[in-house]
Amino acid sequence: MTPQTLEREFDVVIIGAGAVGENVADRAVQGGLTVVVVEAELVGGECSYWACMPSKALLRPGTALHGAQTVPGAEAAVTRTLDVAAVLKRRDYFTANWQDEGAVKWLEGAGIELIRGRGRLTGPRAVEVAGLDGNIYQLKARHAVVLATGSTPNQPPIQGLAGLHVWGTREATSAKEIPARLLVLGGGVAGTELAQAFARLGSEVILVARSGLLGSFPAKASSLVAAGLRADGVEIRLGTSTESIHQNDDGTFTLTLRDQHAGGQSAVTADKVLVSTGRHPALEGLGLESVGLGASDGKPLRLQTDLTGLVRGTDGHEPWLYAVGDAAGKNYFTHQGKYEARATGDAIAARAKGELAGDPAAWSRYAQTANLHAVPSVVFTDPELAAVGRTLEQARKDGYNASSVELPIDVSGSSLHSEHYEGWAQLVVDEDRRVLLGATFAGPDVGELLHAATIAVVGEVPLERLWHAVPSFPTISEVWLRLLEKYGL
């Protein structure tokens, strides 16, 4: 069949059909608008197939096994090793075997049209799609174009790396076999989680980081994770740079490392190398130069957006271009991207109806205010890290008269949870208003403590009122009581 050029018009055109794009589309359709999403890969995006879901599916069996091994009575009833084939099969289930029929069916049921292909801007409100079916689609948006294209991995400047078939997080989370030796470059969330997952699945793992491990968290919290990784046999080399890498004749990789403090060099060999050194917004090839946006310094392009996701600095007088999720470059968390998407979809629909003009009120349904004050995150290692809002250092840097209170998690609930439970908790307080600015928890299963802290931070609950939120006994949440008591309530 001869390729065709097809012209279509919609109220909203969304480039990217991941979790963020889906949520913008859903909110816009609920607001009465017509929507098309453009996607070149799988509907459902990175989180569903190569990030959140498969990585957590790889991590959870090891955490569950370790949890049972720390409780007398249960310990004697479980084996010491994971069934690798069963773990990988369960991972495949959570990725729907990298098939997106279910996600496509959801789009159809929600009244959202899908065009498979690569989209790029050609002017204000104009998107051209090179369809995977061979056709060219010229799309016109009456009200908005939304960039929900996610992020792409950073490429570190390591001699010899370019052109080598090393792993990124995609290859790691979709791996069909467990390598005997794995070297992980990067001490952030993804690198740390996957280092522990593969160690528990049988790999000998070395983790190499130029600076610290999980450096955005308080040191006492990240040190508990480091101890957990070492207990699983992970060799951690912090303050270490990777100078070069080459692939050997047998397919293995040899890397030259340098200790930045001692200055000495060493060589390590691994069967697989996972590069996990951060990400940046996936904005290349989107035609942003056609609307007056583009990077001139050779660095990855980053967009400036307001509280509705509206991109600043575009050609044209009326607001029309939005960026959400990783593409906006503010927070690289699926849950936060979906939050942004809901606000953006509602704002687009409201502006189309004339119900929203200018900037929305903070904390309204159209504003992504939590991005400024209350971003929650969980690191699904064992032990877990969970945090929301500001650390003490961030709060003081932002000009707050801030103090902190911290203590080990040592309550009846933690003692019942497991033998030798080790945890740590911190609250960051705005002394002028007597409300929480942030909270951090470290320890087994502390992720389930986080939403209470998120509510307290978002709601700016006075500490004197928070004192009356009585934690149930005997739960790990009793640490809230101990923290407030230490503060002086």
Image (spheres, helix red, strand yellow):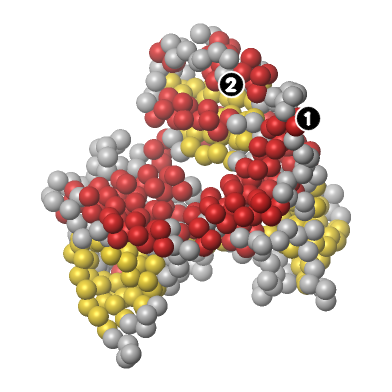
Image coordinates for residue 266, horizontal then vertical, percent: 86, 58
Residue at image point 60% right, 35% down: 385
Disc 1 element: helix
Indicate left or right for 8 with 19 as reference: left
Image coordinates for residue 47, horizontal then vertical, percent: 49, 54
Labels 2, 1: front one = 1
Residue at image point 72% right, 49% down: 83
Residue underneath mark 1: 76
Residue underneath mark 2: 476
Q: Residue furthest front?
A: 77
Vertical position of residue 86 compared to residue 379: above or below: below
Residue contact between numbered discs 2 and 1, judged by CB atoms under 8 Å:
no
Image coordinates for residue 150, horizontal then vertical, percent: 45, 59
Residue at image point 44% right, 44% down: 335
Which numbered marker is on residue 454?
none
Q: Residue furthest top?
A: 489
The N terminus sits in image quarter: bottom left
- Tell me the amino acid under the disc marked 1: Ala
